[in-house]
Image (cartoon, helix red, strand yellow):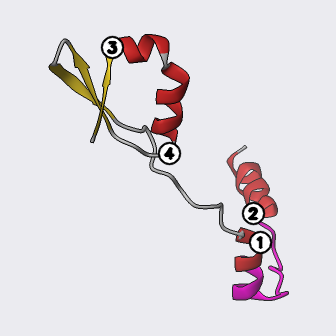
Amino acid sequence: MTTVTVRDLRYKFPEIEARLRRGEVLELRKRKEVLGRLVPALPAGGPTPEYAAMQRAIFGKRRMKVTAASIIRASRDEGH
């Protein structure tokens, strides 16, 4: 684990931010006393899946006879 100081946060924040974005966990110190850890908020994720391609692979070109919008519209009309 890499150590950074409070002074580093003040004067080298862009460098520390870049390290956090790369997924590094940093130990924060002030006068040799450990204050805590800086941990990336979100783990580095992969690209977003191709949902349209997944849908085509599962269902092919099949279409529903009734759309979801028409089902919702009908249920709203029944309520009034």
The residue range painted magenta reads: 55-68
The amino acid beneath tag 2 is Ile
Disc 4/disc 3 C-alpha distance (Å): 20 Å
Mark 1 or mark 4, which has the lower sequence index?
Answer: 4
Task: Give the labeled residue for mark 3.
Answer: 6
Q: CA distance from mark 1 to mark 2?
A: 22 Å
Q: Amino acid at mark 3?
A: Val
Report x, y in % for residue 29. 23, 20
Please state which of the two labelled residues, at mark 1 or mark 2, is closer to the viewer.
1
Of residue 43 and residue 14, the one placed in the foreground of this image is: 14
Q: Residues within 10 Å of mark 1 (few under 14, many from 20)?
A: few
Q: Do callouts 1 and 2 mark residues in contact (Cβ within 8 Å)?
A: no
Q: Amino acid at mark 1?
A: Ala
Q: Secondary structure at mark 1?
A: helix
N-term mark: 1 or 2: 1
The residue labelled by disc 1 is 52
Give neighbour class at mark 4: few <14, some 14-19, many 20+ (Cα, 10 Å).
Answer: few
In the image shown, does 6 or 74 lie closer to the viewer? 6
The Cα–Cα distance between marks 1 and 4, rounded to whole angstroms, is 30 Å
x and y, in percent, of residue 31 in the image: 19, 12
Split into 4 quadrants, where in the image is the N terminus? top left
Q: Could you tell me which secondary element the residue under label 2 belongs to? A: helix
The numbered mark at residue 22 is: 4
Lower sequence index among marks 3 and 1: 3
Q: Is residue 71 above or below residue 6?
A: below
> Residue 5: x and y, percent?
31, 19
